[in-house]
Image (tube, coloured by chain):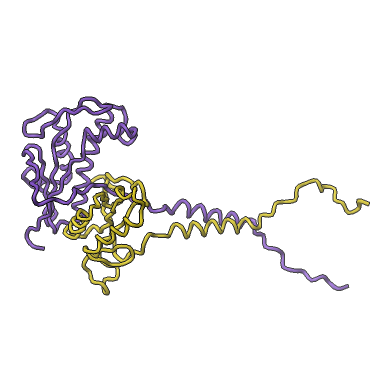
Chain colours: A purple, B yellow
């Protein structure tokens, strides 16, 4: 009697699906389609040399200078980046209406009503030799100051964070606390 | 008759799961390929600064990128920071043409909402960035974003 030839037994491939599922979930979780994060700004339109810039009263400006050694100067002295946010907040809000801090104009804003909008402008000056990192940190701190003020207003008026407000509410807050950061025309001090 | 009929013929035949792995593998490859795609190959080393107040970009399709940094291939292109537009090195004067071509590629309604993202390395000096910003002002591309990553620590 001829013996029947045995073939190889079929490989059990049912666990293959599990393995590939594992791989799939791994890649799904670990890979994020890279989202872009950053600080958004609006550049001023090109300046016209014939038009004089409007005079801004001294009390309404807060000058922050960053030099080529990445040192910060505000209030006429070398400052620390950790103190910049609080100083900027104080300047922009002027809580006790001090005469040396910016004036305010009462404006009618929908949803908020009468609100005293600060006329203060933060003027940021940097050197060509300033590192981008330092410049960004300063921008970040100034943005933090404005964002905190917005949050405080949103909490007191609408009872929630700025981010959780509706679009109309946000627009009202943006009007009440404008992003008043002006960048001076670049200067080149002390060579490159 | 009915001799060869098995008794439990009413039961469903077992579902063949052999092709399951193929389907999943296809999905896997799809995700693997999709996630490694980039807008353009980087020729410059970009290590963006970190910040706490950063926000997400709303519309990615209305965005054009300017990369600034030291060339990756330093021996070939030198160690001075360079600008990269699309897939090649560029000079500041090329930005005008770049923005115009970006505008031409979009709908006319979307043009005011076009944002330029500056992805610059930390160590680049502000002189280079200022030149770019001045150029953007001249062209009228005023919406700007400084790319950054989220800061983990809370203090400097």
Residue that appears at 32% across and 63% down: B86
Residue A117: tell me if it is visible.
yes
Residue A176 coordinates in the image, percent (x, y): 22, 32
Residue in front for this viewpoint, B10 or B77: B77
Q: Residue at x 16, y 43 (%)?
A: A84
**Residue that lies at the very extreme toward the right in this rendered image:** B1
Q: Relative to A175, say whether A20 is above or below.
A: below
Depth order, front residue of A44/B20? A44
Q: Quadrant of the C terminus of chain A?
A: bottom left
x and y, in percent, of residue B91 in the image = 23, 65
Tell me: residue A34, above or below residue A109.
Answer: below
Which residue lies at the image location 31% right of the left edge and 48% below the top edge?
B113
Q: Is residue A19 visible?
A: no
- Position above or below: B46 against A113: below
- Which is nearer the eye, B105 or B136? B105
Q: Quadrant of the N terminus of chain A?
A: bottom right
Q: Position of residue A185 (x, y in %)?
A: 12, 52
Judge left or right: residue A189 versus residue A107: left
């Amino acid at each position: 009697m001829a013996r029947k030839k045995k073939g190889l037994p079929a490989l059990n491939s049912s666990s293959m699906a599990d393995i590939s599922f594992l791989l799939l979930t791994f890649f799904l979780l670990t890979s994020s389609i890279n989202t872009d994060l950053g600080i958004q700004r609006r550049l001023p339109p090109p300046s016209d040399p014939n038009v004089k810039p409007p005079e801004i009263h001294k009390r309404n400006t807060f000058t922050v200078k960053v030099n080529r050694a990445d040192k910060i100067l505000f209030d006429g002295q070398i400052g620390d980046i950790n103190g910049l946010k609080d100083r900027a907040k104080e300047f922009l809000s002027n809580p006790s209406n001090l005469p040396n801090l910016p004036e305010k104009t009462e404006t009618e804003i929908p949803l908020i009503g009468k609100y005293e909008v600060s006329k203060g402008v933060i003027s940021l000056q940097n050197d060509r030799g300033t590192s981008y990192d330092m410049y960004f940190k300063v921008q970040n701190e100034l943005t933090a100051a404005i964002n905190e003020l917005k949050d405080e207003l949103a909490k007191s008026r609408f009872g929630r964070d700025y981010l959780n407000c509706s679009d109309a509410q946000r627009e009202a807050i943006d009007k009440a606390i404008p992003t008043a950061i002006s960048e001076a025309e670049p200067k080149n001090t002390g060579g490159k | 008759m009915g001799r060869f009929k098995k008794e439990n013929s009413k039961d469903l035949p077992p579902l063949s799961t052999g092709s399951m792995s193929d389907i999943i593998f296809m999905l896997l490859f799809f995700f693997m390929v999709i996630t490694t795609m980039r807008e353009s190959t980087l020729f410059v080393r970009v290590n963006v600064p970190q910040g706490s107040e950063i926000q997400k970009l709303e519309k990615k399709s209305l965005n054009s990128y300017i990369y600034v940094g030291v060339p990756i291939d330093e021996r070939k292109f030198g160690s001075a920071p360079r600008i990269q537009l699309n897939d090649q090195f560029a000079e500041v004067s090329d930005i005008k043409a770049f923005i115009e071509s970006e505008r031409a590629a979009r709908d006319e309604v979307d043009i005011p909402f076009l944002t330029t993202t500056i992805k610059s390395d930390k160590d680049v000096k502000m002189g280079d960035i200022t030149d770019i910003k001045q150029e953007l002002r001249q062209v009228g591309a005023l919406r700007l974003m400084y790319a950054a990553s989220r800061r983990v620590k809370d203090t400097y």
